[in-house]
Image (tube, helix red, strand yellow):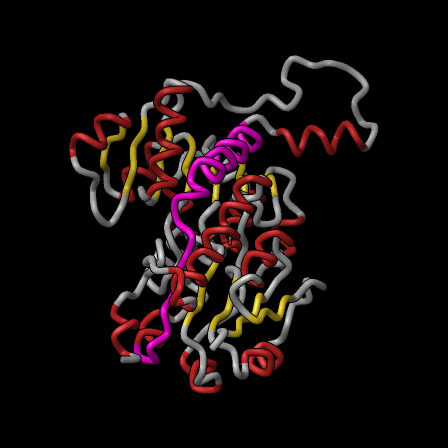
Amino acid sequence: MTASILVCRRIFPDVVARLRDRFEVEANDADDVWSRDELIRRLQGKDGVFVTGTQAIDAALLDACPKLRAVCSLAVGYNNIDVAACTAHGVAVTNAPGVLTETTADFGFTLLMAAARRVSESEAFLRRGEWTKWSVDLFAGSDVHGATLGILGMGRIGQAIARRGAHGFAMPVIYHNRTPLPADVAAAIGARYVSREALLREADHVVVVVPYSAESHHLVGAAELALMKPTATLVNIARGGVVDDAALAAALREGRIAAAGLDVFEGEPAVHPDLLACRNVVLTPHIASASVPTRRAMASLAAENLICLLDPAAGRLAPTLLNPEALTRRL
Ligand code: DGY
């Protein structure tokens, strides 16, 4: 019997067409943001769901959608999905690692450079018509090349940022991660393992790239910001909630750190009003992986996972399955 799937947000039409070749598809072409009740209603009778990083999939939803067998996300971060609950319900979960690494690392560097060199702040000044003369210290910021780059979280994206810093910008790179990299990998990247405290004290630019979890909630808060240099910049391309946005806004306002670049926010798409009021922060709407080829690759990978999980004719394993144990739960 043909499986039935729900595509929760608008994606590329050719990717939907590929899914329609295999499945009965209900697609959200209007790109509406469905409430949880609406999502549960639409999931009735569905075998699979194509999600993004924003739909919460938890035990209560799974209880209410007993036919569901596959949750496939186009995001690499999956803190919106309770994987343990999915496994217990025999629901396979996939994410989209790898395909967005370089694009996201590019954007981490974009925010770092924009924050350090005061790009948003100076552009806003120019657009307001306030630029009347050149001055020696007009929007003078801090250097990126040769400065110490501190990376919190050293997965694929952290390593890609480290390579850019070390090889492109001659930056000494220090990092902190739950597990240090194997020595040869760290040496090839040119990255030195330090404690979180040492990283915050020593780095000129700190980039946060850790997944969100209960342990990483407010990993960078008032106490951590107090360790940073007053000339330092902070970049968050991880998840809202890893940085305490209210504490960061206070540090930026009071000049306790120089600048920040943020792509993710606590409670997004809402942004803390104190951050909106700060001039020395570059703010972008969760677009770090948003190049056209990369977003297409993310959607294609999620579709491939759905096909492998729900079409027996596919005859191949889902490429990025997070919980293989779920597959035997249904037998
Ligand atoms: C990801 O892939 O996790 C990005 O943040 C987009 O949600």
**Does the magenta portion include 114?**
yes
The residue located at (55%, 81%) in the rendering is 40
How many marks can you see?
0
Residue 243 picture location, percent across and down: 45, 52
**Does the magenta portion include 156?**
no
Residue 178 picture location, percent across and down: 24, 50
Residue 108 picture location, percent across and down: 48, 37
Q: Quadrant of residue 319?
A: bottom left
Q: Nearer the viewer, residue 268 or 146?
A: 268
The residue located at (60%, 29%) in the rendering is 118
> Magenta span covers which residues?
88-116
Q: Quadrant of residue 326?
A: bottom left
Residue sitting at the far left? 183
As drawn, 118 above or below 330: above
Tell me the quadrant of the picture where the C terminus can be found. bottom left
Q: Nearer the viewer, residue 169 or 123?
A: 169
The residue located at (42%, 70%) in the rendering is 70
Residue sitting at the far right? 129
Q: Nearer the viewer, residue 197 or 285?
A: 285
Q: Nearer the viewer, residue 27 or 97?
A: 27
The residue located at (45%, 33%) in the rendering is 232
As drawn, 225 above or below 24: above
Residue 197 picture location, percent across and down: 29, 43
